[in-house]
Image (cartoon, helix red, strand yellow):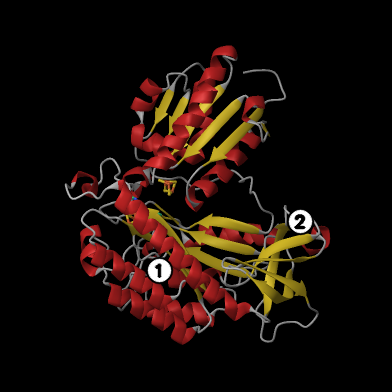
Amino acid sequence: MTDSPRRYHITTFGCQMNKADSERMAGILEDMGFQWTETPELANVVLYNTCTIRDNAEQKVYSYLGRQAKRKHEQPDLTLIVAGCVAQQEGESLLRRVPELDLVMGPQHANRLQDLLEQVFAGNQIVATEPVHIFEDITKPRRDSSVTAWVNVIYGCNERCTYCVVPSVRGVEQSRTPEAIRAEMTELGRKGFKEVTLLGQNIDAYGRDLPGVTAEGRHQHTLTDLLYFVHDVPGIERIRFATSHPRYFTERLIRACAELPKVCEHFHIPFQSGDNDVLKAMARGYTQEKYRRIINLIRDYMPDASISADAIVGFPGETEAQFENTLKLVEDVGFDQLNTAAYSPRPGTPAALWENQLSEEVKADRLQRLNHLVATKAAERSQRYSGRIEEVLVEDQNHKDPTQVMGRTRGNRLTFFTGDIDQLKGKTIPVKINIVRAFSLTGDRVDTPVAGAAC
Ligand code: SAH
Ligand code: SF4
Ligand code: F3S
């Protein structure tokens, strides 16, 4: 190892799971005496936490890696790590592609970073991609925010959507115990965090791998039970969760969200396609009618709830008429936000081997048409905020305008207003909305507290 100061840099790609893993790995590196640097060129340890959900995400990693690999020839004591989903997918073959690498580690090994690095410092080149039981995290994550925090509740995914690499790179479902989750949230509350987002690739699967069934034969630990169990953690004012799967979304869960004041009225429920035959080919396990029923039920209980989702266009064999069913669903539901993507064939997934792949032109054209509709609908949805008073939990300064702070409404709309971050950070402030954009809002602070406010 080099003399101090020893610095580390992490670049994170991909989803919230990866962000949460990076925060834990950063915590481990700080425990080992490393200091954060924003600039990879100044770091002794450079870690890329990677994503392979689509081909362009994977290719991005290789271009970043190439730069650092070159640098290693001039600075042999640089430690180069690839973690996350590309590491898991490629394993040994990453070392052949980039022999300068010191450590290739899958997502299940994130909590073992110290142990793995010690082996690297002892002169070994390591690949850690075997499936493991994920041990409870004993280190303290270095969290990016001091107001909002991610808390993993279930790792992995047991679904087999035919387009998706996640089950093969994240492994089988492993739920944390309700006690461990509550303990982490209690610690966060004690430190002054105000909002927690509970995380899982399919969060509705929470608890099905834990022991215990009720007298009625239902799993004892479900996401609904977990929400009741953690709801009164002192200091935590808002609770969110993601990602929901339409196949497992229950009325019991909706009722709990309506009943529990800290649970915010925002639901992220990917539908992927608005066509039943495409949904079947994707092996999603629900119909578009069932999806609509869930949304209607949510709106029966919480009329103002915001709804976001993910959708894929250009799945193998998708016809123009089938694509139009997706447009129709988007038109009818009126999403507050929709993450859209053109289908990308992924290694080891069934759909990648099918012969009915669509051309890139067709996919790009459909993506553009869908995005246009999404922006129009989101702008329409945003109108309902105009003139309203919303509770905004202040997270940070508006980096584009330092006279403003930024935060989120309970419905997860990004909101800006004039204020001093030193005074307002972590506070929930009533804000009267006067400018509405498709995906964000601007308003003015008001003194009247919101009637019936939970936070
Ligand atoms: N667990 C979540 C999503 C995980 S991946 C769920 O079940 O919905 C995040 C999003 O990436 C997916 O919702 C999907 O819209 C998109 N995605 C996944 N695989 C993809 C692929 N092969 N091509 C294009 N988009 C994909
Ligand atoms: Fe992928 Fe489906 Fe699992 Fe979501 S539920 S992570 S889309 S396999
Ligand atoms: Fe990407 Fe892995 Fe998340 S593939 S989307 S980082 S689970």
Q: Quadrant of residue 442?
A: bottom right
State the image coordinates of residue 267 (x, y, percent, origin top left).
48, 70
User: What residue is disc 1 on?
Assistant: 222
Can you tell which of label 1 and label 2 is closer to the viewer?
2
Image: 244 above or below 397: below
CA gap, disc 1 and disc 2: 43 Å
Q: Which mark is residue 401?
A: 2
Q: Residues within 10 Å of mark 2 (few under 14, many from 20)?
A: few
Q: Residue at x 47, y 19 (%)?
A: 100
362, 87: nearer the viewer: 362
Image: 29 above or below 69: below
Amino acid on which the number 1 mark rests in the picture: Thr
Q: Please identify the quadrant where the N terminus is shown.
A: top right
Q: Quadrant of residue 407?
A: bottom right
For this orientation, the residue located farthest to the left is 355
State the image coordinates of residue 10 (x, y, percent, origin top left).
58, 36
Looking at the rendered structure, the secondary structure element under dot 2 is loop
Image: 19 above or below 234: above
Q: Is residue 107 visible?
A: yes
377, 232: nearer the viewer: 377
Image: 135 above or below 236: above
